[in-house]
Each structure stands twice: as structure tokens, then as C-alpha cells.
Image: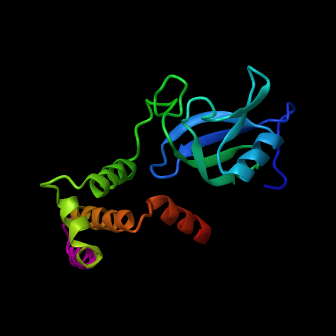
Amino acid sequence: MNDLRFDENGLIPAIVRDARTGAVLTLAYMNAESLARTRETGETWFWSRSRQELWHKGATSGNTQQVVDIAPDCDRDALVVSVLPAGPACHTGAASCFPTIPPAPLDRLMSVLRDRYEQRPDGSYSTYLFTEGRDKILKKVGEEATEVVIAAKGTDDTRLTSEIADLMYHLSVLLTDAGLGWEGVWEELRRRG
């Protein structure tokens, strides 16, 4: 967090996103003190431009945000703060201040899978896989990977697309079962880039 570029008012924009889904929750501002408190406490602190004071997210509402990661952008003049929210992020009571931004397809899938993992509703194929356990999930990942290879040897692009979708679904089940998400995969790919 060294060499951050705060603006002339000593502030830096902080885009807050859900670490599990990647959904943008809000845009807030931090100064050096709120950033330091965020890092010390593991929960978000911001600078309120309207009240001109520090603001601990959830201090009065209970809707805290547990910080998973803080990353500066390439110019080091903005931050992305990945959090595990304990309630709505927006003062209106909405989960996000940007509710019109639809989640990416994998974000929606991961959200459904986390729900299936926790709730285990009857009749769900995902519930079946989670209940059968890791070995069954790994078997399905292997089967789907093989089907991708076979489809790729052919000329049917529709089948190849379908098999890749099946593989991504089963990989998502594996990530969910392991308590992980795609964001770690994307970060690893970014590091390799």
C-alpha cells in the first residue's frame, strides 16, 4: 500500500466488491487514516465527504464488511476492496448501490452453488454432487474434461461449447466444495499474465 496517489483532498476512491461474487457493492472514499484502520481491524472504514469524518461501515447498522483483499489499480490512484458483507452495502437497504449491474454468468452460478451447498434442497443435481462428496465431484470433473477433448477433436462447435460449459459447471462445483471461488483463479491467471 506504499506510494498510493491520494487526491488534493487526501482521498482515494475505493470500489467495494463482494469477494465471493465479484459484484460491485459501492464506491466510497478513503484517506490515509481510514485505510490504516481498515487494514488494522479487517473491516472497512471510509472518509465521509458529506460529514467530514471517519466512518466505520456497519458501526450503527451492523452491516459490516470483512476485508479479504485491498488492491490498487495500475496508477495507484484507486482501490478495489474485496469484502465479505454482513448485510446490505447501500444506505437504501439494497445489497448494492449499483443494483442495475447484472452479475456475470459465473457470479450467478457461484451464488446458486453456494446456496445449494448450504441449503441442500431436494431434487437438485448440485445437492446430489455435494452430498456424494469430493470423490464424486472429481470423477465428474474428469469425465467432463475428457468430453471436452473428444468434442474438440470433432468439428461440431456447438457440442464443444456445450462440453466446455459442463466442465466449467463441474469445476465451479469443485471450487464451491473447496470453499473457493473463481476470483482466486482469475488472480492466479493475472499473476501469470
Q: Position of residue 171 (x, y in %)?
A: 33, 67
| Residue 162, picture quadrant | bottom left
Q: How many marks?
A: 0
Q: Which residues are magenta?
A: 139-156
- Color theme of the render: rainbow
The answer to whether one can see residue 112 in this image is yes
| Residue 130, picture quadrant | bottom left
The answer to whether one can see residue 158 in this image is no
Q: Position of residue 117 (x, y in %)?
A: 30, 58
Question: Residue at horizontal 48%, vertical 37%?
Answer: 87
Residue 25 highlighted magenta (yes or no)? no
Q: Nearer the viewer, residue 177 or 12?
A: 177
Q: Position of residue 64 (x, y in %)?
A: 57, 40
Query: In the rendered view of the protein, which quadrant contains the N terminus?
Result: bottom right
Q: Position of residue 69 (x, y in %)?
A: 63, 55
Question: Residue at horizontal 69%, vertical 46%?
Answer: 79
* 149 w.r.t. 69: above or below: below
Query: In the rendered view of the protein, which quadrant contains the C terminus?
Result: bottom right
